[in-house]
């Protein structure tokens, strides 16, 4: 199967269950539910508010009932962690309006994500490989443990470096600052 075929098939089947279902794979010319599904930190749908695109969004009455990611081919802990964080941080999903619906100034319909939104990630794996153990038996257990114990000192630092700087030198400098036990915490690069 090609990447996206399973997602398209699932999305297409869900459209008949009384919900508004949008999915990011398939032929938009054949099915008007094939749309970009933008996970947003806040409105409006601008790049600076956008976390990522999600595979399938199930909506009803301007609320997101489910956000679904289907990792059809090789997936990794990094991919799964990206999906988890996207789903945790998403406050709205913007669905680009179909060209037939674009009659006002707004290019997107917005749906709210709340505590009642189901957030589902599916990983397709080869039973002869080690992905199941890597993700389900190791990563998932570690994440459950982490989320029960996490404190703010465990949240990763976000360090921004201008692309006009000597990036390698800046990164090394920041790393060395963090590795220095006598570092001044007020100038830690974050």
Image (spheres, rainbow, N blue to C red):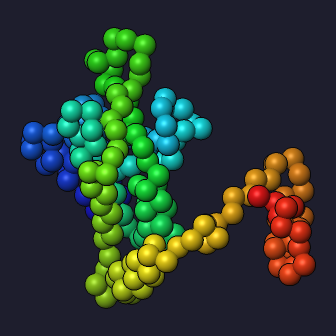
- The quarter of the rendered structure image containing the C terminus is bottom right
**x and y, in percent, of residue 185 in the image:** 83, 67
Q: Quadrant of residue 112?
A: top left
**x and y, in percent, of residue 175 in the image:** 82, 72
Residue at screen point 52% across, 73% down: 150
Q: Quadrant of residue 39?
A: top left
- The quarter of the rendered structure image containing the N terminus is bottom left
Residue 44 visible (yes or no):
yes
- Which residue is farthest left? 17
Residue 25 visible (yes or no):
no
> Does 190 sit left or right of 64 as displayed?
right
- Of 90 and 146, nearer the camera is 146
> Does 30 sit left or right of 181 as displayed?
left
**x and y, in percent, of residue 110 in the image:** 36, 31
- Of 101 and 28, nearer the camera is 101
The relative height of residue 153 versus residue 135 in the rendered view (above or below) is: above
The relative height of residue 114 versus residue 104 in the rendered view (above or below) is: below
Q: Quadrant of residue 106?
A: top left
**x and y, in percent, of residue 75 in the image:** 43, 70
Q: How many marks?
A: 0
Residue at screen point 86% across, 81% down: 181
Residue at screen point 50% across, 42% down: 41
The relative height of residue 109 versus residue 159 in the rendered view (above or below) is: above
Residue at screen point 48% across, 32% down: 43
> Does 182 sit left or right of 55 as displayed?
right
């Amino acid at each position: 199967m090609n990447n996206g075929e399973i997602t398209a098939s699932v999305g297409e089947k869900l459209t008949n269950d009384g919900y508004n279902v949008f999915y990011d794979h398939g032929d938009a010319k054949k099915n008007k539910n094939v749309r970009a599904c933008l996970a947003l930190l806040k409105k409006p749908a601008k790049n600076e508010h956008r976390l990522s695109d999600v595979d399938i969004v199930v909506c009803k009455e301007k609320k997101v009932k489910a956000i679904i990611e289907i990792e059809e081919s090789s997936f990794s802990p990094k991919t799964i962690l990206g999906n988890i964080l996207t789903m945790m941080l998403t406050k709205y999903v913007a669905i680009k309006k179909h060209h037939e619906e674009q009659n006002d100034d707004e290019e997107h319909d917005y749906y709210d994500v709340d505590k009642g939104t189901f957030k589902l990630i599916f990983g397709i794996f080869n039973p002869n490989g080690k992905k199941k153990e890597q993700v389900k038996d190791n990563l998932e257990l570690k994440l459950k443990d982490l989320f029960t114990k996490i404190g703010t000192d465990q949240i990763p630092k976000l360090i921004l470096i201008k692309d006009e700087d000597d990036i390698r030198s800046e990164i090394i400098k920041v790393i060395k600052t963090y590795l220095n036990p006598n570092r001044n915490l007020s100038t830690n690069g974050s």
